[in-house]
Amino acid sequence: MRAVVTGAAGFVGTHLVAALRERGWDVVGTDRRPGADHRADLVDADLDPLVGGADVVLHLAGRASARASWREDFDGYLHDNVRATQRLLHACHAARVGRVVLASSSSVYGGAAPLPTPEDAPTAPVSPYGATKVMAEGLAAAYGAQGLDVVVLRYFTVYGPGQRPDMLLARAIDAALHGDELLVFGDGRQTRDFTFVGDAVEATIAAGTRGPAGRTYNVGGGAPVAVRDVLGRVAALCGGTLTTAGAAAHAADVRDTAADVSRARGALGFVARTTLDDGLAAQVAARRAALAAPSADRR
């Protein structure tokens, strides 16, 4: 299989590229950042030679962070999540790529969806970021109607080694290891469906090779946990206490998330296999190793 991975230098992308290469796939990774085979911005790059001949394009590139989308220039989110997606889908359609997998987010559901949330629940995002993901999914549907084989994955709170430093668990681990105070939005009773990055990768690979065209799948860990409980586990793994400071819930945050993964289980054979305790232990161990490295950024 020849695969193109966009966002290859990102959190999930780095794990995905490694997993595909371990399976013997011919992989080309592209990203704006260093660390990818092909460094380019999808909005202005020549995409024809990149996607030509690909069996599957796994589109993980995009600008993340629901909270930051309220304070940053919205043009950046349009550029990275909407314009880049349209150009890539257009190039894949022209090149007759075998399949495109679009990485979306549980943020498309907003806070009013039933729990656990099925894929046919209405989309009602509560952040500009979530709105751009809905727009990207709409583009996928439009190109799908013109014959492009596109599958959409809605990731739920992916964590694990290499997680973005602005994410809760990455911040919590650093705070616990350094003895710093952690800012927590909300009362801590809100729940999240944490998904280990290795499980998200397996679902992504399965979506590239299995299941019908045009389908959308939730990718979740399957066992939502309260934030305060997860922080307690982080503190225990880090060998100490974790001091927190509370702040009001952010406008971009929903109260609870829980994925109904029955569709992905049936069509893709997806089952999350990493427990939260094992996944947290892996993330803590990876962060300890990174901090111990000679060139580590210790803060």
Image (cartoon, rainbow, N blue to C red):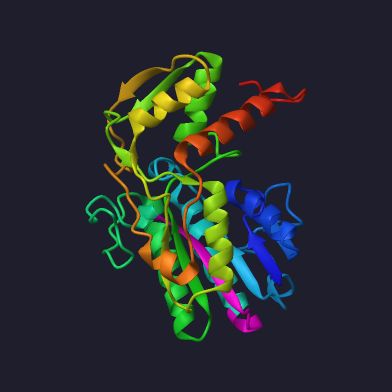
Relative to the observer, which residue lies in front, 172 or 129?
A: 172
* Residue 159 pos. (x, y %): 51, 42
Span highlighted in magenta in the image: 93-105
Q: Is residue 95 magenta?
A: yes
Q: Is residue 259 magenta?
A: no
Q: At 46% across and 67% down in the image, what residue appears?
A: 152
Q: Is residue 118 left or right of residue 221?
A: left
Residue 184 visible to the viewer: yes
Q: Is residue 57 above or below residue 147?
A: above
Q: Is residue 92 above or below residue 85?
A: below
Q: At 43% across and 21% down in the image, what residue appears?
A: 182
Q: Is residue 120 above or below residue 6?
A: below
* Image quarter of residue 105: bottom left
Q: Is residue 74 left or right of residue 109?
A: right
Callout count: 0
Quadrant for the C terminus in the image: top right
Q: Is residue 21 left or right of residue 98?
A: right
Q: At 49% across and 48% down in the image, what residue appears?
A: 64
Relative to the observer, which residue lies in front, 272 or 81?
A: 272
* Residue 177 pos. (x, y %): 55, 18
* Image quarter of residue 37: bottom right
Residue 166 visible to the viewer: no
* Residue 76 pos. (x, y %): 51, 51
* Residue 191 pos. (x, y %): 31, 39
Q: At 55% across and 66% down in the image, what residue appears?
A: 206
Q: Is residue 110 above or below residue 294?
A: below
* Image quarter of residue 255: top left
Relative to the observer, which residue lies in front, 17 or 49?
A: 17
Quadrant for the N terminus in the image: bottom right
